[in-house]
Amino acid sequence: MEIDAAREVRTTCPYCGVGCGVLAKVAADGQVSVRGDPDHPANFGRLCSKGSALAETIDLDGRLLHPEIHGRRAGWDEALDLVASTFSQTIAEHGSDSVAFYVSGQLLTEDYYVANKLMKGFIGSANIDTNSRLCMASSVAGHRRAFGSDTVPGCYEDLELADLIVLVGSNLAWCHPVLYQRIAAAREKRPEMKIVLIDPRRTMTADIADMHLAIAPDGDVALFTGLLAWLGQYNALDRAYITAHTTGFGQALFAASGLDLAGVATATGLSEDELGRFYSLFAATAKTVTVYSQGVNQSSSGTDKVNAIVNCHLATGRIGKPGTGPFSVTGQPNAMGGREVGGMANMLAAHMEIENGGHRDRVQRFWDAPAVAHKPGLKAVEMFQGVADGHIKALWIMATNPVDSMPDADAVEAAIKACPFVVVSDVLANTDTVRHAHVRLPAAAWGEKDGTVTNSERRISRQRAFLAAPGAARPDWWIIAEVARRMGFGEAFAHGTPAEIFGEHAALSGFENGGARDFDIGAYADIDTAAYEELTPFQWPASSPEGGVQAGRDPSNTRFFANGNFYTTDRKARFVAIRAVTEIRTNPDYPLILNTGRIRDHWHTMTRTGKSPRLSQHIAEPFVEIHPADAQHYGIGDADIVRISNPRGDVLVRALITSRQRRGSIFAPMHWTDQFAAKGRLDALTAPLIDPVSGQPALKHVAARIEKFAAKAFGFAVMRQRPQKIAADYWAAARCKGGWRVELAFADDAVDWTAFAGSLFDASSVEMLAYHDRDAGQHRIAAFAGEHLVGALFVAPGPVAVSRGWAAERLEEIHASQRERFRIVAGRAGAERPDAGAIVCSCFSVGVKQIAIAVAAGCTTVEAIGGVLKAGTNCGSCRSEMRAIIQANRMHAAE
């Protein structure tokens, strides 16, 4: 594909489900720059820190550029023939259910569609599931139980029109910053808007909340079941809506009525006063949106949580109207697109049901397929258990890293290692999953491939190529179609462009629909390449003219269910009767509840964000949040290295003591892998415990224990090149400008530090300068090649007191004088080189010390700091941290 570098290309961000529009431009010298698309209706020009740094993540370092078979380079024909023949032979010998695809919300809709078509329509098995199972499967199940379809009723505009926003299990400020900023901007215009945060942790999102309910883990079912009972008790119901458009209300209210306020307080850990204030606010506010995310979904009771929330909105008629509704915010860029094509093991394409014989027949006739899978396949956790027990004998993993992201990750890795035939399509040559593949297939990356994605408000947008694919990399849809052809299904997979696939996908959505299904984009069934290239973002439904709805932005078609018309047999919504059950998973050996999640500037398993020096400045190593009282009880100090463990495994992370964390619980992010840390794969600790309806694993309620790691020496190093092996008990590596920065800890201080430094810096051709105070346990070593710093190592008996940012900056400078070299060994910045301190604003690389200086100079508001330093003026996700720094420095000045 030839790319015109002279124009700015409209594309879509590849991170979360907000689906922000991006303008990407390639300069004459090949440099890429990105900015938010001001015309995209999801973000109107805003980008978060991750989106703003996209241009830093598209280099070819570490890319898989050619097919490989058993580690040797191969051609496409050889690799594709092997994949096709092995899958065909396995099916012939063991049946269609002996093979499986594990795919990803990182795929484009066209990729997803072809993979689903091959597995369900032509292989004849439903053993295709996705890492979206870990993200939003409980939302899908809850929607289907209540609405008869997987329909998100509302749109982003509702967040700005609501008078009350209830955020449940969602750290919106860090995980969906652009939506957070839309809400913050609306709040500034309408200060009377109320925001309630329901989360065990006081996250950065609490900065905007009028009320923070620090709920006990998995207390959400009791909270919202109790709310339904309250609404009934105080007659805060929309009786007309309930009667006209729903069934099952009586049973649901009866089930809820068994839980009085005292019972809800016991189950949630909240006081009756807190509950009464929240319930009263909800009951009194007609325009209410409840936004929920992974704190709801990633639970063994996730589907019941979703339906408990939906029940309250149905009971008050707060659905489908401007400023109302339950709103599921998805975590991945194309989780919604995967749902549309049936990318999960219990779904068919176009929101049709695999259990429905009529739907199966319709899909089979449309595809002209030999057979369509007639029963659900193995969901993600079941799939890897099937790999482990030998039932799955050939596995194809696409665009995901299950060795790090799946629960019980060590068992998943063992299963993959033992599988007879593993294929991985990926962008990178070395991930914790790719390393176990028999066949590695180089996939095109963001910026190189064309297709569509669907965001959390049902808006379909284009991802467009602005870079040529490097080496032999190919789009995922092409790879899948080529394998299908070699398996004998060539006529059905004769797709030449993503536009053809999108057109087929659209045609299937409108095929024999007539309004019977929610998902319908049949108006685009005949789209040609030119129209596909110019496709602008649109929300579905966009039906064929026969369906009565034209494509485009007719405002009457942006919301569902204001007047009922659900997708059940009688077109009425179903209340789900739910009884709250409290699960206690802790015990004397594992007394803490481990909660897992994301941080602001990293994404999934860091295969993309780990490339950006800017995104690694804010938090550069794995950590655990622990309440001060718990830290004192376990003898843990701030910045200590600690071990978190349970019967499945253990990790080593840095301690962060904070009162934002609930007592008895700890929080650690899931991003770190064997590529970035010695022992940071957090999902090795999470259990393969799943929601019985959705199959989604419970990643936020894990029994664990914590103990201080007895480190005798700590280290920090910067280096131009990262070594293949780091001989430390604890290490965490992060990109910085000019190279890498590494945190270190050692169980034994009897180390030859000069030799260790040599192993980090390749001492064969460098000049070493060193300072050793063995009595104090202080060691500082710098290595130079000519006038350039190759690396520097700082060792101390406690956490090393050297400015990380200052040390990293030295890698890019010329060091001609001996004085400057000794200053590096001393680990001190000169007066002419002020230290920014730990980075707070990743967008503009503003540190805590810079903010403190600005406060001392009279900048006492976030806006004033932004005017001087620009911090907080782009994505805004650092603004709550800035407020805390301002407050701390003002209090210090007043002492």
Image (tube, helix red, strand yellow):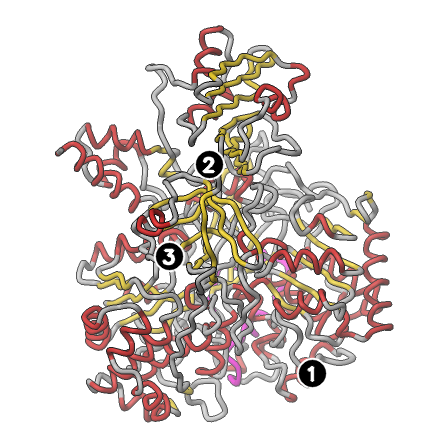
The residue that mark 1 highlights is: 374
Check residue 743 for magenta coloring: no
Please report the residue visible at 29 percent of the width from the left and 87 percent of the height from the top.
Answer: 257
Q: Residues within 10 Å of mark 2 (few under 14, many from 20)?
A: many
Q: Is residue 774 above or below residue 884?
A: above
Write down the region rendered in magenta. Answer: 515-539
Farthest residue toward the top? 818
Task: Return the disc, 2 or 3, that comes first in the chain's sequence.
Answer: 3
Q: Is residue 836 visible?
A: yes
Please report the residue visible at 37 percent of the width from the left and 41 percent of the height from the top.
Answer: 637
Farthest residue toward the left? 894
Q: Position of residue 247 (x, y in %)?
A: 39, 92
Q: Position of residue 319 (x, y in %)?
A: 34, 77
Q: Amino acid at mark 1?
A: His
Q: Are marks 3 and 1 in contact (CB under 8 Å)?
A: no
State the quadrant of the C terminus: top left
Q: Position of residue 326 (x, y in %)?
A: 37, 72
Please report the residue visible at 63 percent of the width from the left and 56 percent of the height from the top.
Answer: 410
SS assignment at label 1:
loop
Q: Is residue 526 visible?
A: no
C-alpha gap between disc 3 and disc 1: 39 Å
SS assignment at label 3:
loop
Q: Main secondary structure of the magenta part?
A: loop
Query: In the image, 462: left or right of 392?
Result: left
Q: Amino acid at mark 2?
A: Arg
The residue that mark 2 highlights is: 614
Q: Position of residue 526 (x, y in %)?
A: 62, 69
C-alpha gap between disc 2 and disc 3: 21 Å
Q: Residues within 10 Å of mark 3 (few under 14, many from 20)?
A: many
Q: In front here: 226 or 588?
A: 588
The residue that mark 3 highlights is: 171
User: Which image quarter: residue 93?
Assistant: bottom right
